[in-house]
Amino acid sequence: MKRDKIYLVGFMGAGKSSLAQALAHRLDWRAEDIDALIEEREHRSVSAIFVAHGEAYFRSLEREVLRDLLGLRHTVVATGGGTFADADNRATINADGTSIWLDLPFEGVLQRVPSDGSRPVAPDRASMAVLYGIRRVAYQQAHVRLDVSRTSVGELVEQVLDQLGF
Ligand code: S3P
């Protein structure tokens, strides 16, 4: 397990992007966000990419961006909710750094993620629930699991540092 790179994985709404920023700041590392890099590259939002080109195209961009980040060390990467669900991405991530699953109970997801179709893979509550169940099996393969349901970002930063022995 390589300790000079951290990947934050987990379902939509788990707080991957904000924890990546806070952790990188604390460690004096770099923070990268796969969704943000895709949006920069394509000059449009993730939702607009799904509408214009479909999910398969988005997933291929996600894989490319992940590969482009492999050279970086001392970096915290916020993945998208589906990145770690792909077996190849999962193997790549687990070989390149330490993966941390931000585990948020489904009730928390419902509070944080609007099920109004504004997120491409969350058209309604029922399909989000199905996806949540399927994805947990993948997230369980992360090196570290963090319960993020009742914890502030500041406390989570300290928990990660403890877990990784920093
Ligand atoms: C997705 C989650 C989103 C984004 C895209 C697909 C997913 O990222 O990558 O909408 O499949 O769960 P967040 O988890 O940052 O919302």
Image (cartoon, rainbow, N blue to C red):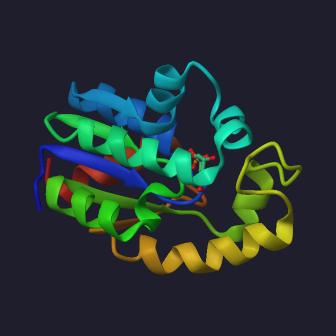
Q: Is residue 154 left or right of residue 28?
A: right
Q: Is residue 96 left or right of residue 84?
A: left
Q: Is residue 58 left or right of residue 68?
A: right
Residue 65 % position (x, y)? 35, 38
Q: Is residue 49 visible?
A: yes
Residue 117 % position (x, y)? 85, 49
Q: Is residue 50 left or right of residue 111?
A: left
Q: Is residue 68 above or below residue 85?
A: above
Q: Is residue 31 above or below residue 19?
A: above
Q: Is residue 13 visible?
A: no
Q: Residue at x 42, y 66 (%)?
A: 86
Given residues 134 and 52, the one toward you in this image is: 52
Q: Residue at x 34, y 42 (%)?
A: 64
Q: Quadrant of the N terminus?
A: bottom left
Q: Residue at x 50, y 59 (%)?
A: 10
How many marks can you see? 0
Q: Is residue 12 above or below residue 124?
A: above
Given residues 56 and 14, the one toward you in this image is: 56
Q: Residue at x 71, y 77 (%)?
A: 130
Residue 39 % position (x, y)? 54, 27
Residue 99 % position (x, y)? 29, 59
Quadrant assignment, res 123? bottom right
